[in-house]
Amino acid sequence: MNDALDVALRLLIVFVVFLTFPLIVGQAEHKVMAHMQGRLGPMYAGGFHGWAQLVADGVKFAQKEDIVPAGADRRIFQLAPAVALLPYLLVLLAIPIGPGEGAVGEVVDAGIFFVLAVMGVGVLGSLMAGWASANKFSLLGGLRTAAQLLAYELPMLLTAASVAMAAGTVSLPGILDAFEWWWLPWQIVGAVVFFVAGLAELQRPPFDMPVADSEIIFGAYTEYTGLRFALFLLAEYAGIVVLCGLTTVLFLGGWHGPWATDGLGWVWTLLKTAVLAFVVIWLRVTYPRLREDQLQKLSWTLLVPLSLAQIALTGIVKVVIQ
Amino acid sequence: MTLAAATHGFLSPTGVEIAFLLVGLVTFGAALVTVTTRQLVHAALWLVVTLGGLAVEYLLLTAEFIAWVQVLIYVGSVVVLLLFGLMLTRAPIGRSPDADSGNRWAALAVALASAAALVWVVVDAFRTTWIDLDGAAAGSTAVTGASLFQNWVLPFEALSVLLLAALVGAIVLSRKAKAKANAATAAETAAEAAVKDTKDAKAGKEGAL
């Protein structure tokens, strides 16, 4: 009975995190973007600095009519948002937030592979949406999504492999247990490549060619309205949380910190994740959108060689210190 | 041999065995739909279900590492590549009347033959081997890695050389096509230039006249 209660409690906590953190990131994006652009952003909803803006948006989305285009493939069109969103919930289960067995939803032995595999499945949702909408903008968006995933999955996997080599394990809590502070400079190239490739997989600016709203009208999501559209947006922000959490765990030492790691390790994890999420928003405001050929070139001619060099460096250092 | 068979009867299956069978049936059904559906993109999506079902089977056999790699490579990359190819060429919504091939009986025969061979080999090799599901995981990453790099290094290396050869071959083929296309455009521009020259010359003549 205690075990069942324990499992239920963990699932509940992960679910609550899944529902709240993306909204916090979204609200932070509203305000941070606004201030970077010399505006105020939402100020009225909820009273204090517009804190309830996203709640109001959610109510608005829920009230909208649910429309499926006549020419669309009905079932796949309706299934796509769930396929896009659910993988991020599963990934959150495997991210350790503090030291010990108690601070992770579920210990997965092949954690890195689980996380990257399931994140890759999420992109299938965009592909399904792009095809099933029967809209040429959506199809173009789907095509670009697929091309982008194929280009950026490889550097992401290679840099994650580099960390796994350094730690001698592919389990996420195991990597954190093996972490030393000097891994930070050692794996810094891998960290940057992983983060950039992750941004591209989430289709965040400056890698948002697949959803370029001024060009192909939000790509795969052109035909979506109401709750289903909101689910796609939620998937994007859940993706930011997951990517920042993963980068924290793999490259920045997760719950390790200069002081107070006993008992307060989870604060470090959350702090690092929040700083990374801020960087994601900052990049969106700073850089213009990359063109499709520039996107592909960046991955194949810069990120893949860099990640291979990182693996070589990891191997050499690993052999030397043994 | 008789001892192993005696301790594990087929008539009193455990929960895991029942789950394995059920997932196997779903996987088999999805595979059948994949090859029989008339809608191209639906076939690719049913393939996702099939490959995912296989991953669940691996999980039930405690081969966690293999399961996640299966999802990563097949669902995450191969199917995405497939969908990409379909969307690039043609992916109509609804039925494709030309989705059936005239070779389907030959394909069925080959599929049945290879399935029979595989089942025979696997049954013959592992007839009395049982996985202890309650003990330490027999398919964890550490165990898989150790056996891969201790007992199976040669096949592993041979496979990597094979993949490298395929990679080099793909690059050579694509470069050849590009070189040909370049040569063709060069010839075209030359021809166009020649035509333009003669036109200019004509115009010059006319102007002179």
Image (spheres, coloured by chain):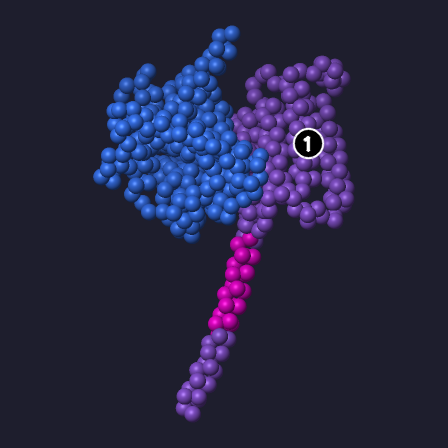
Q: Nearer the viewer, residue A78 or B37?
A: A78
Residue A44, given in percent of the width and then of the height, sits at: 27, 28
Q: Pointer 1: residues within 10 angstroms few (<14), some, or many (20+)?
A: some
> Magenta stretch containing residue B200, yes or no?
no
Residue B19, given in percent of the width and then of the height, sits at: 64, 21
Tag 1 residue: B29
Q: Give the residue furthest to the top.
A: A1
Does B15 appear above or below B147?
A: above
Does A225 appear above or below B187?
A: above
Q: What type is the residue that disc 1 sits on?
A: Gly
Q: Nearer the viewer, residue B84 or A91?
A: B84
Judging from the image, mark 1 belongs to the subunit labelled: B
Residue drawn at 47 percent across, 82 percent down: B198
Name the colour assigned to chain A in the rendering. blue
Q: Nearer the viewer, residue A271 or B5?
A: A271
Q: Nearer the viewer, residue B143 or B87?
A: B87
Corner quadrant of residue A104: top left
Is residue A109 visible from the viewing direction of this image? yes
Q: Is residue A43 left or right of residue B161?
A: left
Residue drawn at 46 percent across, 18 percent down: A11
Residue A45, given in percent of the width and then of the height, sits at: 30, 27
What's the magenta region?
A: B170-190
Residue drawn at 41 percent across, 24 percent down: A19
Name the colour assigned to chain B in the rendering. purple
Is residue A316 visible from the viewing direction of this image? no
> Magenta stretch containing residue B180, yes or no?
yes
Corner quadrant of residue B23: top right
Residue drawn at 57 percent across, 30 percent down: B67
Corner quadrant of residue A75: top right
